Amino acid sequence: MAAIAITFPEETNDQGRPTLWFGSWLVGESGQEAGWFHSARGGGGGVYEVPAEASGVRIRKWPNDGFEAEYADVLDLSGIGVITANELDFDIRKKYCSLPEGFG
């Protein structure tokens, strides 16, 4: 089984608190979320065994304690050894977004 290293940086949210980070696996052709592997405030990370059924990774962060999380999906894990969460693009429309065009 393959493993992937994911780092979550020290960031401060809008309230001056450490940013909350969350990591989960995506499975199947529709981007269904499966089990999670990381949930913590502030920096950290680790090396995670990629489940055989995983089709990707979803990384969430909460830049503000009062709003919904932003997220980024990494859908092709082949050849990726390291993901650095703050280098992901949280501002693009996601493949599995359920909102109509023009939103999200």
Image: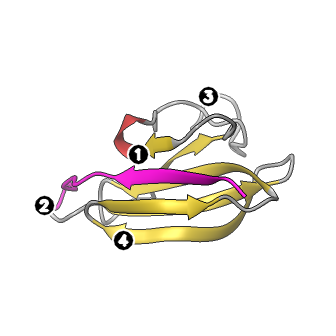
- Residue contact between numbered discs 1 and 3, judged by CB atoms under 8 Å: no
Q: Between 93 and 46, which is closer to the camera in this rendering?
A: 46
- Mark 4 vs mark 3, foreground winner is 4
Callout 2 environment at 10 Å: few (<14), some (14 to 19), or many (20+)? few
Label for residue 40? Answer: 4
Q: Which residue type carries mark 3? A: Gly
Instruction: Answer with the quarter of the image where residue 34 lies.
Output: bottom right
**Mark earlier in primary sequence (4, 3):** 4
Local secondary structure at mark 3: loop
Q: Position of residue 59 (x, y in %)?
A: 51, 52
Reply yes or no: does residue 2 show up in magenta.
yes
- Mark 2 vs mark 3, foreground winner is 2
Label for residue 102? Answer: 3
Callout 3 environment at 10 Å: few (<14), some (14 to 19), or many (20+)? few
Q: Position of residue 95 (x, y in %)?
A: 71, 36
Instruction: Answer with the quarter of the image where residue 14 lies.
Output: bottom left
Q: Which residue type carries mark 1? A: Ala
Callout 1 environment at 10 Å: few (<14), some (14 to 19), or many (20+)? many
Residue annotated with mark 2: 16
Q: CA distance from mark 2 to mark 1?
A: 19 Å
Q: Which residue type carries mark 4? A: Ala
Boundaries of the magenta span: 1-16
Magenta-drawn stretch, dominant element (helix, strand or loop): loop
- Mark 1 vs mark 3, foreground winner is 1
Local secondary structure at mark 2: loop
The quarter of the image holding the C terminus is: top right
**Mark earlier in primary sequence (1, 3):** 1
Q: Residue at x 31, y 62 (%)?
A: 44
